[in-house]
Image (cartoon, coloured by chain):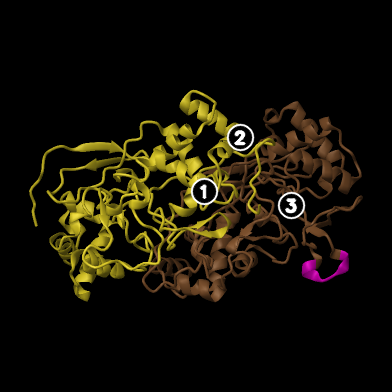
Chain colours: A yellow, B brown
Amino acid sequence: MKMKVTGLAIAVALSAAGSVAWAAAAKDEPIQPLVAPKVTNPGKVELGKKLFFDTRLSKSGFISCNSCHNLSMGGTDNLKTSIGDHWQKGPINAPTVLNSSLAVAQFWDGRAADLKAQAGGPIANPGEMAFTHELAIDVLQSIPGYVAEFKAVFGSSRVDIDKVTSAIAAFEETLVTPDSPFDKWLTGDEKALNAREVAGYKLFKESGCVACHNGPAVGGTSFQKMGVVEPYKSTSPAGGRSDFTGKDEDRFNFKVPTLRNVELTYPYFHDGEAATLEQAVDVMGRLQLGRKYSEDEIGKIVAFLKTLTGDQPLFTIPLLPPSSNSTPRPTPFD
Amino acid sequence: MKMKVTGLAIAVALSAAGSVAWAAAAKDEPIQPLVAPKVTNPGKVELGKKLFFDTRLSKSGFISCNSCHNLSMGGTDNLKTSIGDHWQKGPINAPTVLNSSLAVAQFWDGRAADLKAQAGGPIANPGEMAFTHELAIDVLQSIPGYVAEFKAVFGSSRVDIDKVTSAIAAFEETLVTPDSPFDKWLTGDEKALNAREVAGYKLFKESGCVACHNGPAVGGTSFQKMGVVEPYKSTSPAGGRSDFTGKDEDRFNFKVPTLRNVELTYPYFHDGEAATLEQAVDVMGRLQLGRKYSEDEIGKIVAFLKTLTGDQPLFTIPLLPPSSNSTPRPTPFD
C-alpha cells in the first residue's frame, strides 16, 4: 500500500465537546480521515440539539428526529424501514445522521440539497412526523424557554421554520465521528489495524469498492445504480433518484451511503434487506462488481469495515423547555 | 410558618454526576428536601441507563423505557395516555420516573412493590413494548457488548430478567431531582421563594393538600380515592387499586402522584385529562377537599408548585452496544 505523505498541513479543529482533534497529514488513499468540526455557534448547536430530540415537532408528540436517527444507535433506528405516525411503515431505510454533513445531498434520492433542506421534510411528511411547519412553529412559539433561546441565537423571538431547520442542521453538522482505528492508521499509526483488517482494506480498494465508497465519509459523494451487473430484486416501492428527478435514467440510482460506523447502522441498503455486513458485502460484490467474494474475502472486508467505527458524539441529554398553558397539545390518536 | 430546625444532622450524599449535595437541616414542614442518592455501583447504573434507552427490549425495536418516561421531558411522555406497540392507546397516563424510588409502590395501582418489579412490566405488556422476558433476554445475550457488561457488573455473563430489571432499577434510583427552589427555601434560603410562592405553599398546607401530598416526593406515600367529596368523571377504563387487589373498597383508589417537577409532567391525573396545573388544582380542590379555590388562590398554589422543579438528571447520552449477526431482529410490522 502507498505510504506517501500528502503534505505537511496539520488542521486543528475544536470538537463539539470542546476537545481538540488533529487531522494529521494522511496517507495518499481514496479515503481521508474525518476531522471533528469546529463549533462556531454553540448556542445554535444547543438549540438544534433540543429540537432534534423534541417530540413536539410531531403531530403525535411521540416522534422526534432522534426516534429514527437515534444517536444511541449509530444515528439510525436499526429497522429495515422506519415507523411513522400511527405506526405507518416507512418506504425506505433511515440513513444515519452521523457524518451526513459530508454528503453531496440528503435523502437516498438526494431530493434535499443540504441538511437544512432535509430537516423540514420529516416534520411535514404525513407518513413520518405527520405535522405541518405552521403547527410546529405554533407549538415552539408558545414555549417561553424556546422563544428566549431563539432570541438569543437569532436575535429575534419570532420562530420560523427557516430558523428551526437551520438550528437542527447546525447540531447535525457536529455529528462527525473522528478517530476510528482506520483513521488512526491513515494518519500513521500502523498498529491501529491488524494484518487482516489491512488485507480487507486492500481488497476493498483493489476490487473496486472505492470507486463509489471514497472520500472522508467512505461514500455519500455520488448517486449510483443499485444493480449494475445484476438487477437488484426488492419489494421496496423506492425508485431512487428518478422519484425526484422524474428522469428514467435515474431509476434505481441511489445516493451511495457512507460506510462510516457501518458496524452500527444495520440493516443495510435502501430497503434494509441485508441484515448483516457479510450479506451486504456479498450482494455488493455480485451486483455492483460482478465478483463473487469467497467467505474469507468477505470476512476480511468486514473486518476492515468495522475499523470505520469512530468516536460517537457524546453529549449531555438535552432538557426540553416545558410547554405553556397555551401550547397546542399533541393529538396522537386523532 | 414554622422555622424550627429539626436537628443538627447534616447528610452528605454523592450525586450520580459525582457532585456533592448537602441535605442541610430542614425546616419542620410536612415536605422534606430531596437528597441526591449516593451511587455505590456506577457500573450497574451505567448498564441500567443503557437498558433504559434500549429499544431492543421491545418487539418492534422502536420503544424503550425512555419513550414513555422521557428524561428530556420530566421523565414522562407528556401525553394523556401513552403510545404502545402498533400505536396502541394506553389505558393510563405514564407517571414520571423522576423520584419514583421514593414511592410506596409502583404503577398508579401499586401492583409492583418496587422499581425492580416494575421494570419488567412494560417489556412484556402486549399494549406497551409487547415483547416477552425470554425474547428480550435472547436479544441481550446475543450482544457481546452487553454480555461483557453483565459479566463485569454481576460476575456472570448469563443475562436474565432479574439482572436486567435490577440494573434498570439501579439507574432509576439515581433519577432524583434535588435543589429545587422549594428545597432551598426549606433548608434556610429565604430568598429562594418569593412572597406569592410562600403564600401558595401556606394555602397548599392549610387547605389540606399536604394530607396526601407530603414527604420528600410531595406524594407517592399512600393510595387515595380519586373523588372524595364529589365523584370524578372519566372515560378512562382504569379502576385504580381494585384492579390489582380485587377489593371493591379499593375502587378508584390511586397512588397519590409525586408533585416534584409537576411543572414538567403535564398532563395530570391518571387519565391525563387535566391539561394545565390550574385545572388540576381546581379539580383537586373541589373533588378531594370540597373547596372551590378562587382564581387568585389557584394562581398562588400553582406558583408554589412550580418551585418544586429540581435539578434534572444530567448525563451523557448512552451508546448502545451493537447487535451481532445472531441477534434476533425486531419485528415492528408483524
The nearer-to-camera label among 3 and 2 is: 2
Identify the residue position indicated by label 3 in the image. B257
User: Where residue B130 appears, x then y in whole percent?
Assistant: 59, 68
In the image, residue B247 lies in the stretch drawn in magenta: yes
Identify the residue position indicated by label 1 in the image. A64
User: Where residue A20 appears, x then y in whole percent?
Assistant: 29, 39
Give the structural element (helix, strand or loop) at label 2.
loop
State the CA–CA distance, disc 2 to disc 1: 17 Å
Dominant SS in magenta = helix
User: Where residue A61 appears, x then y in whole percent?
Assistant: 59, 48
Chain for disc number 3: B
Q: Is residue A300 above or below residue B284?
A: below
The stretch of residues the image draws in magenta is B243-249
Mark 1 Cα-neighbour bin, 10 Å: few <14, some 14–19, many ≥20: many
Name the residue at 46% across, 33% down: A162
Res. B131 image quadrant: bottom right
B258 relative to B35 in the view: left or right: right
Let me know if residue B152 appears in the view. yes
Q: Mark 2 or mark 1: which comes first in sequence?
A: 1
